[in-house]
Each structure stands twice: as C-alpha cells, then as structure tokens.
Image: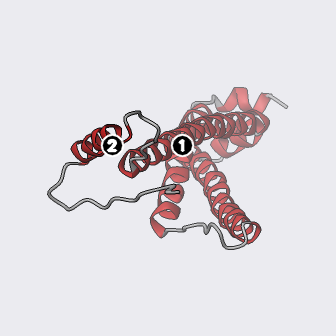
Amino acid sequence: MLTSISVRLKDDVANEAAVSAISQLLTQRHGVKDFQLYNFEQIRQSIERTSMTFSILILMVACISLMIGSIGVMNIMLVSVTERTHEIGVRMAVGARQGDIMQQFMIEAVLVCLIGGVLGIALSYAAGALFTALAGGLFTAIYSWQAAAAAFFCSTLIGMIFGYLPARKAARMDPVVSLASE
C-alpha cells in the first residue's frame, strides 16, 4: 500500500500548476479524491506569516514596555526634583545658572536610563543562555551587537526625551521659593 509520494519541481515549473496537475491526475486515476496534497511552499509561507505575526507581537510588547519605562523615568525624575527643591534653591543662590541645573538633571535621567539599558541587555543575554540550556540545544538564542547598540541608543534617547521636562522644571524654579521650602 502506497502512503505518500514526494514530488520535487524543476525551477521552471510553477508550484500551483504542478499541484493542480497532480491532483487532476490522481483523481482521474482513482476515480475519487481519496488523497491529500501538502504543498510545502504554502506551509513555508504559513510559517513565515506566523513568524512575522510573532515578530510584530514582540515589537508591540517592546514598545509598550518602553513607554511604561519612559513614563516611570519621568515620574522618578519629577519626584527627585520635588524632593530636592531646597538643594536646587541653594545651588541657584550660590550662582548656578538654569543651564547648570538643567544639565545636572538631564545627566541623571540619562544615567538612570543607561544603567537600566545595560541591566536589560545583560538580563536578555542571561535569559537567552538559560532558554538555550533549557531547550537542550534544540533552539539557540541569537545575539547581535546591533541589537545591543540599538537598546543602548534607545535607553539614552529615552533618558534625554523623558528627562527634559523634569530638568526644565528644576531649572525654572525660583530660588527664593525653593529656599523657603523644606
């Protein structure tokens, strides 16, 4: 009893035409359609679509995570500005300019994000190694310096963008009001 037939097409033969011709021939010979045809090109395309969908899902999760992290950085920096109001007033009273205050808080925001980025990269490498070990070599994590550089760049950019508002708030404080608070 014959259970399967594999057909390899020449380069110049259209895939759909070959599937149709094989189906017609088998139906004609058997008198009934008592077989199934599996087109590996369609299976490959289905796998590619699934992979693309999964990649988009991961991208969306990453974007949502970045937004949540960005808002968190901004909130942390706003709390830092509020808690250090007196310190800002003292610095301005002894001659610090608005640019100096703004620069201080921008550097702090970028450093917080860079440390988070480095920890995130290290954690992703560790998770990839763990996944590879648990998979028993069936799957291996692929690392690229471009992805690490992009993560580093994104964390720096997030620190600059979401640290700007708190830094501006700190720089625009009135020294008299800042010194009076505590």
Question: Which color mode does the image show?
Answer: secondary structure
Alpha carbons under labels 2 and 1: distance apart: 42 Å
Nearer-the-camera pick, 146 or 26: 26
Residue where numbered disc 1 is placed? 54
Residue where numbered disc 2 is placed? 29
- Secondary structure, mark 1, is helix
State left or right for residue 19 relative to residue 72: left
Q: Cβ–Cβ below 8 Å for labels 2 and 1?
A: no
Q: Give the amino acid at mark 1.
A: Phe
* Mark 2 or mark 1: whose residue is earlier in sequence: 2
State left or right for residue 79 relative to residue 33: right
138, above or below 106, in the image: below
Q: Quadrant of residue 119?
A: bottom right
The C terminus sits in image quarter: top right
User: Residue at left 57%, top 31%?
Assistant: 172
| Image disc number at residue 160 | none
